């Protein structure tokens, strides 16, 4: 009883401590909120990096803490006024949500900017096979698992939409993280690395197409009565057309891509020689406007806004990349941590206990699906490579990252997946991102002996 | 009548065209709004730059157009849902306001980052005199004018607060613009340029102190009954203490500034040799958090948040500047245009006709005040310089820029100045920024003959 009343006192104390924020003018309150969130995100990120874990995981953990760690029944998110409430959203939460979403849009733009269309020509048959299998196998596994779970355990009639989104979230390989790890280990010039990076580039595009189709089916199902095949078909057509038009612009952009490209593998993937920015105009505002415009357009025609952002990034991938990258890095350094904190804040630990088994199975399937795809892709298409190489590629494909989380987040905000399923995906992404690097290091050492660089 | 009904039809047409934005989900609507605003800002900026005018003026003009150009009684701001309404602010307007204010905070951070404390040691007696006179004379002129205007013409009892804010807005020289123009003309290494740039650096700091005192007086007057001298005194004390503590940290920061600095004049002002970033930690998140934190703190203790942002910039001015500048440039490239558009959107042309005479007088006093200060400062303190040099410095001090506008904007949002007075300051800043460069070019040519570079 003493503990309990003490807890209540702490709650009251905290609530009175935070009260001035709510009474402050809007801009002052927002400044305080963003300051606290940004600072906590950084402290968590710094601690996690020193533990050898990705900074993004730290930022997500900061978000989980802010929204879930209750002292005296009182979370920091509530104290700051940015807590998420399903029925009555506060203006502070909406502002935070907008900043977080601008963050993910610019993040996906930079992911797109790392996916040069000319890179695709340099990607070999093995990478293509690994990428395509790496989309199909995890999608089928995820789809089957969720259908079974919804049908036999939850008896939830929304199994189709749930399964589609969850499967889509299991598809994306995290190129940024994988490339960074390969680079840190000093194995960027091995055949395995080339296959992994090439496959991850193709993977990104395939994921966007899968996501576009999933969103289309969801939209068609939402509007129509039940499953309307014609509506679905036309929605998918719109989605595919949108992607195809941008891809066409990429390959036959103005000025036309006639020059032969010299391509090489770097820490960021296959790099082709950059073309000069051909117009007498600052590329940044044009890029930012295209990013915002295509994101809005994607949203208007019923796709996820991040698809537009990703394709906008691809449009600019071959031009003025260095000048653009520096600017977008600045924006992302401020906004992307807010997105990851927001991702963590939407995780609800209360009542999550029942889902631990599902989380475990999803993680196993996520890793196994990508592993099998990578393994088979190598064995089937390149007779010169053996089990060791296939093993390395299989492991290298397994980490999911921001894209998987983003897909799940899109599903959550569209009410296409449940709160619990969203939390499952977040944990799956975190665990695969943490497990893969040391495992990959061991596999590489198994083949090449002591590595130049180190991981953990 | 035909015209009228046509106009009404156009209004209806536009209103139905824009209706989907309001019905869209929050994030989609915000994406559309930011896309349109950002694109228009850029188009206007591009046109103005090609006309030889600053891009910022173009962005402000874009804002004025968005909020004031009514077609069929229907402005673009209303169509987009971001129009400002004094009584019932829409969530879209609030989101836009937050983004704009984040923009101005990061902008003032970079202004502060260009104001190195060690620079002040390199600033000569002449620059100091020019700067101090350049604060006192325009302040006194502006204060006198508004007191007279309020007392004799408007019969407004709020003359004290009006006059204080308007006078403060007339104080700040625009360092960024002046330095850019000097650099373009290729006269950066002349004695006049050194005096102007040095004075502008001191000016920035003095402006912040003036603003802090003005805000303190305003706050004390708001809370107390009438003019409470003790309250005012303590408010000013808090303000001065806040500035002083940060300045002390700047001069005796950790690690202590013991090394001798080599300073030189560049296009961005006096530049001292950069010290290495001494800690094993990424400087950007620390800088961004400090900027947000000090802005919030300044706001909490009753100062303008931009003062905190400016001082935070000064704190980081001597460390890792290049690494930080690249990141903040990226953020600013996205957010600052939104701020200038917002500045323009708050201009109300309706009913402004009565204020044209006042605007004219304010512009004359703004130019004359800085000119006289620059002229006298040179003549009094440096016997080796004559009228030609004094003339150049006088002209070079006259452009006001973002800081003047920002002070007026703070006054407007705090209801310390009227809508009309705000509009006066915006036009004053625009006109002085447009008049000064060609005038300065002619004065330099009068002394040095044909210039290497050109302006307009």
Image: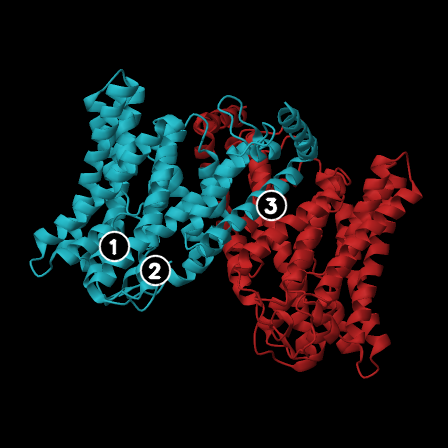
Chain colours: A cyan, B red
- CB within 8 Å, label 2 to label 1: no
The tag earlier along the polypeptide, 3 or 2, is 3
**Chain of the residue where label 3 is placed in the rendered structure:** A
Respond whether the residues carrying marks 3 and 1 are from the same subunit. Answer: yes
- CB within 8 Å, label 3 to label 1: no
For the residue labelled by badge 1, is the local secondary structure a helix, a strand or a loop? helix
Q: Residue A319 got which mark?
A: 2
Residue found 75% across the figure and 54% down from its top: B363
- CB within 8 Å, label 3 to label 2: no
Q: Examine the rendered structure and indicate whether residue B181 appears above or below residue A29.
A: below
**B165 lies left or right of A216:** right
For the residue labelled by badge 3, is the local secondary structure a helix, a strand or a loop? helix
Which of discs 3 and 1 lies nearer the camera? The answer is 3
Which residue is more in the foreground, A371 or A345? A371
Q: Residue B379 got which mark?
A: none
Instruction: State the image coordinates of residue B256 (x, y, percent, origin top left).
Output: 69, 70
Q: Name the residue under label 1.
A: A117
Which residue is more in the foreground, B301 or B350? B301
Q: Residue furthest left?
A: A383
Residue B271 shows in the view: yes
Quadrant of the snapshot with the N terminus of chain A: top right
Residue found 67% across the figure and 67% down from its top: B116
Q: Mark 3 points at which residue?
A: A35
Which of discs 2 and 1 lies nearer the camera? The answer is 1
Q: Examine the rendered structure and indicate whether residue A161 appears above or below residue B196.
A: above
């Amino acid at each position: 009883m003493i503990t309990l009343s003490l807890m209540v006192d702490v709650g009251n104390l905290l609530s009175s401590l935070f009260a001035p924020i709510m009474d402050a003018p809007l801009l002052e309150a927002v400044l305080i909120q963003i300051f606290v969130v940004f600072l906590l995100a950084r402290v968590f990120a710094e601690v996690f990096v020193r533990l050898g874990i990705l900074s993004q995981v730290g930022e997500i953990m900061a978000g989980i803490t802010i929204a879930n760690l209750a002292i005296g029944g009182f979370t920091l998110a509530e104290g700051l006024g940015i807590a998420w409430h399903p029925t009555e959203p506060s203006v502070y939460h909406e502002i935070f949500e907008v900043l977080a979403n601008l963050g993910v849009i610019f993040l996906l733009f930079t992911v797109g900017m790392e996916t040069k269309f000319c890179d695709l020509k340099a990607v070999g048959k093995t990478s293509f096979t690994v990428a395509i299998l790496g989309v199909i196998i995890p999608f089928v596994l995820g789809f089957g698992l969720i259908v079974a779970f919804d049908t036999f355990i939850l008896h939830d009639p929304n199994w189709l939409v749930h399964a589609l989104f969850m499967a889509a979230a299991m598809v994306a390989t995290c190129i940024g993280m994988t490339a960074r790890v390969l680079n840190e280990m000093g194995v960027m010039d091995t055949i395995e690395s080339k296959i992994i990076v090439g496959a991850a580039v193709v993977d990104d595009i395939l994921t966007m197409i899968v996501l576009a189709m999933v969103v289309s089916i969801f939209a068609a199902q939402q509007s129509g009565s039940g499953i309307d095949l014609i509506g679905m078909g036309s929605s998918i057509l719109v989605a595919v057309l949108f992607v195809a038009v941008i891809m066409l612009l990429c390959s036959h952009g103005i000025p036309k891509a006639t020059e032969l490209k010299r391509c090489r593998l770097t820490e960021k993937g296959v790099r082709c020689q950059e073309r000069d920015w051909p117009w007498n105009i600052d590329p940044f505002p044009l890029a930012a406007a295209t990013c915002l415009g295509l994101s809005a357009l994607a949203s208007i025609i019923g796709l996820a806004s991040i698809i537009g952002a990703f394709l906008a990034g691809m449009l600019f991938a071959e031009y003025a990349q260095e000048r653009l990258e520096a600017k977008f890095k600045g924006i992302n350094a401020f906004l992307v941590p807010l997105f990851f904190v927001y991702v963590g804040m939407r995780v609800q630990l209360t009542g999550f206990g029942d889902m631990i088994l599902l989380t475990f199975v999803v993680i196993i399937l996520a890793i196994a699906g990508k592993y099998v795809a990578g393994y088979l892709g190598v064995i089937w298409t390149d007779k010169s490579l053996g089990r060791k190489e296939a093993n390395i590629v299989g492991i290298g494909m397994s980490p999911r990252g921001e894209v998987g989380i983003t897909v799940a987040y899109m599903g959550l905000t569209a009410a296409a997946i449940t709160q619990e399923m969203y939390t499952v995906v977040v944990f799956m992404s975190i665990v695969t991102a943490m497990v893969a690097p040391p495992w990959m290091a061991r596999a590489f050492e198994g083949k090449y002996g002591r590595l130049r660089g180190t991981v953990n």
